[in-house]
Every structure is written in structure tokens, then in C-alpha cells.
Image (cartoon, grey):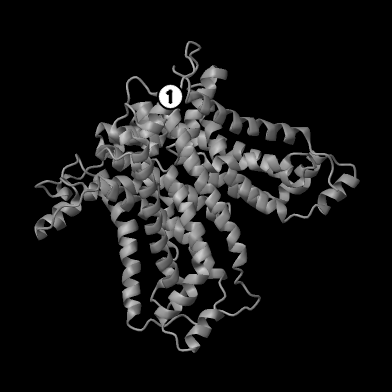
Amino acid sequence: MAGRTSPILLVTSAFISVLIVVPICFLLFGMFWTSFPGDPNGTLSTEFVVKVFTGEGVPRHFNTLSLLSNTLIFSSVSSTMAVAIAFMLAWIIHRTNTPGRRFFDVLPLITFMFPAMLGDIAWTFLLSPNAGLINLYVNHPLGLPPFNIYGMGGMIWAQGLSLTALAYLLISATFGTMDPTLEEAARISGARNRQTVLKVTLPLAVPSIVSTWTLMLMIGLNSFETPAFIGLPAKVYVFMNAIYHKMSVDVPIDYGGAAALSFVSLLLSSVAVAFYLMSTRRLKRFAVVTGKGYRPKPIDLGKMKYAALGFLLVYVVVGLVLPVATMLLMSFMKFYTVVGVNPLDYLTLKNYAFVTSEPLMLRSATNSFILAGVAGVLTTGAAAAMSYVAIRGHMRGKRALEFIAALPVAYPGMIFSLALIWTALFLFRPIYGTMTMLVLAYIVVFLPYGMRTMANSMIQIHSELEEVATVSGASSLTSMRKIMLPLLRPALINTLMLVFIQSYRQLGAAILLVTPSTFVLPVVILHWWASGLLVSLAAAVMIYGAILVAIVMFSRYFLKASLTF
């Protein structure tokens, strides 16, 4: 049996547990506090709760039922779109004889490298009703009505394309482990390709599809970028941009209303998380991996293989080439106008010169890098400590520790930021408006994913290695430092880089916490968008995306990080 758990590990786990639980309590308290956070002159009242749940005195678009309906439509339909496209991509690439299919296998990963806001902003340039490139150069000459990205349909379109790459990475793994002999048997029995897909492949993939769809649903419920860039101009509100509106647009700031809406959103996210956990448990009933080293013969699509190739090409053009090319074009324009002019006649490098010399941009880029590095190191350390206590520790209540560490899965970044504001202004006012607040928010938001990576690796290391060290007189801390950490090095690197990348591109958790001295890149881009600095914003997004691509490539090929949760 392993030795006594180190006090350092216990203290770390206890601190993180308090950091997760206490803000939730203060968020609930904020629903009933009539004044702003930290003001001792407020009183307890049900005013905000009544407004949220009855809609009394609340504008129609902020009515809870309207927000709930919009949020569910936005997240569920965009998730369905992403999973449907991802399934078709995975089936064509992994099961058919479509020409060049192996080349397309890496393209979704490239799409996944770019920040989500790149696609959101690019589609506004393409499908804006009055000045969108597609509307001006395709729809108008053909006499077709213009597309309008600003609305629920536009939000679903941009979010669905944004989620497709991640959905593909998850579903394609299922095709890699699925027993191919079942499909071979169907074809030998005379089933056509369509019958094989509908009656064999699809049923076998259903558990993976359901769990992937539920994960996409959770991401959609917590998404802020698409509702901010596309929903806010059209006054289409879901919970996330409604909370942002109450905290950043309303005068005076509606702290109590934002807290009440956050509580409803938190309940909705918790239901989605419970459904996701239930769906992933069902995966164990569908064990279709065999010990045979047999690989199937690709399905011969005949002439339809060219249609399948066309589908792959359309996805690449729409999901990757068009958004990136549009942002690249806009980043070189002197000013944003495409009406009656040839954009190629107005190209310049001044936008990049401005972005790379603008003090706010440079300061925010530095802040983003430092913040991501500190959050990555501390989150990885906390995940390793809590995983060790939960798996190797011999203490009562360690199951409760695992449950607490998993709570932030249902905790959208923006909602935790709001909860942290309430906590800091009541208990730790000196940290309000500092980088410390941002670091604490990122640790909590990304801790569950770090723990999942660390715990999966830790389970595979047999405890007898530590037992030998304990018998030799080593303490548990020494045993972890000299035995566990070297063996966990790949998992530590993977967790560190994942948290670093996600922290670098995080907007929802940062938007309510930043001050002029702690601005980060995604927040600056959002403010430039609101201020109409569109061509400068395009250059900033391209630089931002290039940095993320460089970080991902460095992580994968030099640090050998797998970059999968």
C-alpha cells in the first residue's frame, strides 16, 4: 500500500476545492443581494429572482423563457449540424475509396487550430446583408435575395462550422476502433452501400454520435464568441450574451439580474453534463473492438466517389479556405468597403504595421502569453495533485474531491468570472482587477479537462512502483517526484499545452474580469469589433491565428503533445 498522502498535495486539493465551491455560493447569494458586490448596505430580496422567473418588468428579449428557447435552439441545431457533417467526413475518409481521402484527414485539425472568432468575424464579412462579399458578388448579380448572417440562422451556421472539426476528431476515432467485419458481412450478404451505412455503420456509431452531440451541446450552451459577434448586432440573445449585456452594456450594471440569469444557465449546463456522463457510460455496452488485425477493404462508391470528393472539397472551401481567405483579404485593405470598388485596388500593409506597433495590442499579447503560461503551469500542477489524491490517496471523502473537481465542467467561463467577481469584492478585494483573478478563473475552468488527462495516465501506472519506494523509506512526495512525475511526463506536457492554448484563446472567462492594465488579445479584438476598427481587427485576428497555429505545431511536433482531451 502506498504511503500517507503528502500534506502539500492535500493542501493544494483543499485550496482548489474551496476555489470552486465558494464562488458558486456567492453567485447564489448575488441573486438575492439588492446592491453591487461588496457593498455592505445592500439587503436580501427576491426581486431579481422574481423578474427572471416571471419576466415581470423585463424586456421581451431578456425574458427567461425567450433566452431558454434561443439557447436550446442555438446549441442543439448547431450541434446537430456539426455532428452530421463530421459523420459524413469520417465515413468518407475512413471507409470509402474516395480519391485523396487521406489528405483530407489532417484538414479538420488545421481548422481546429484557428480561434473560433476568426470564423465568426469572417462570416460577417461574407454574409452581411448590405456589404457581404457573397451577397455583392454572387447573390446580387444572380438576382437572389441577400443572406443575412445577423440572426439565429447565422449564429447556427457559424457555430456549426466551428464545432465540426472537434466533432470529426471525436467521431473519426470511433471508425478507427469499430469492428469492420460487421460491414464486410453485410456487403457479402448483398447489402448495398446505403443499406450497410444505415443498418450497420450508423447503429454501431450511434453511442459515439450521441456522446459527441452532447459534448457539442455543452459547448454551445457555454459559447460566448458567436452570440457576441453575430447575435448582439441582431439583438438575438442567449444566456451568455444576455449576461454580458447586463454586465457591460446596461447602465447601471445589473449585477443581481446577471447573477439570476447565470443561475438558470448553470442549471441548464448541469442537465447537459449529466446527460453527457450518462451517454458516455453507455459507450461501454457497445464494445466493437476485436483482437483481429484485420482492416476492411474500402467501400467502392463507383462514380459516387467523385460526389464524395466534392463533399470533402466543399467542406474545406466553406469551413477553412473561405473564412481564412476573407480575413486575409480584409487585413490588407485600407478600409472596409466593397461597394462599387475592386478590393484588390486598395491593398496595404499598414494594418499589420498598426497592429504590431499599437501599445494596447502589444500589451494584451504579452498579457495573454504570460497568463496562458502561468495558468497552464498551475492548472497542470493542481490537476496532477488532485488526481494523485483521488487515485492514490487513502483518505475519507476523496470521492467528494473528484466530484468537486468535475463541477466546473458545467461552469461556463463567463459565469465563473461573474461568481469570482462577487467572491473577490466581498472577501479578497485586493485581487479584483488583477491578473490573479484571470489566473484563478482559468484554473477552475480548465481543471476538469486537466484532471481527466492526468487521471487517465495515472491509472495506468501500477501502485507497486510507489510501494517499493515506500518500503525503501521514501516519503509520498519523494515517491511522486522521482517515480510518478517522470512516468507522467507525456501527460503533464499534454495538459500544460492544452491549457496554455485554451487560455490563450479564451474570451468568455476573461471579458468580465479584464481592466485596461490586464487586457488580453481576445478581449481587444472584441472591443475593436464593437468600435468598427474592422480592417485592423482582421490583421489582429490573422496574427492571433498564426500564433495559435505556431503553438499547436510546436506542441505536436517538438513536445509530442497529443492535444486531445
Can residue 221 be seen from the camera position used here?
yes
Q: In the rendered view, would you say 396 is above or below 162? A: above
Give how far across and how far down residue 247 sits, in percent: 38, 27
Q: Classify residue 41 as left or right of residue 17.
A: left
> Residue at horizontal 76%, vertical 46%?
392
Kind of residue at badge 1: Gly
> Residue at horizontal 41%, vertical 84%?
192
Give how far across and how far down residue 19 sits, in percent: 60, 30
Give how far across and how far down residue 238 sits, in percent: 36, 40
Q: In the rendered view, would you say 414 is above or below 344? A: above
Out of 45 and 300, give the one closest to the viewer: 45
**Which residue bears the numbered disc 1?**
256
Mark 1 Cα shell of 10 Å, populated few (<14), some (14-19), many (≥20)? many
> Residue at horizontal 48%, vertical 31%?
417
Can residue 515 be seen from the camera position used here?
no
Q: Classify residue 366 as left or right of residue 77.
A: right
Disc 1 is placed on an element classified as helix
Out of 237 and 124, give the one closest to the viewer: 237
Q: Quadrant of residue 387?
A: top right
Out of 175 and 193, give the one closest to the viewer: 193
> Residue at horizontal 55%, vertical 46%?
497
Q: In the rendered view, would you say 321 is above or below 547? A: below
Q: Residue furthest top?
A: 41
Q: How many marks?
A: 1
Q: In the rendered view, would you say 494 is above or below 475? A: below
Give how far across and how far down residue 117 sits, in percent: 36, 44
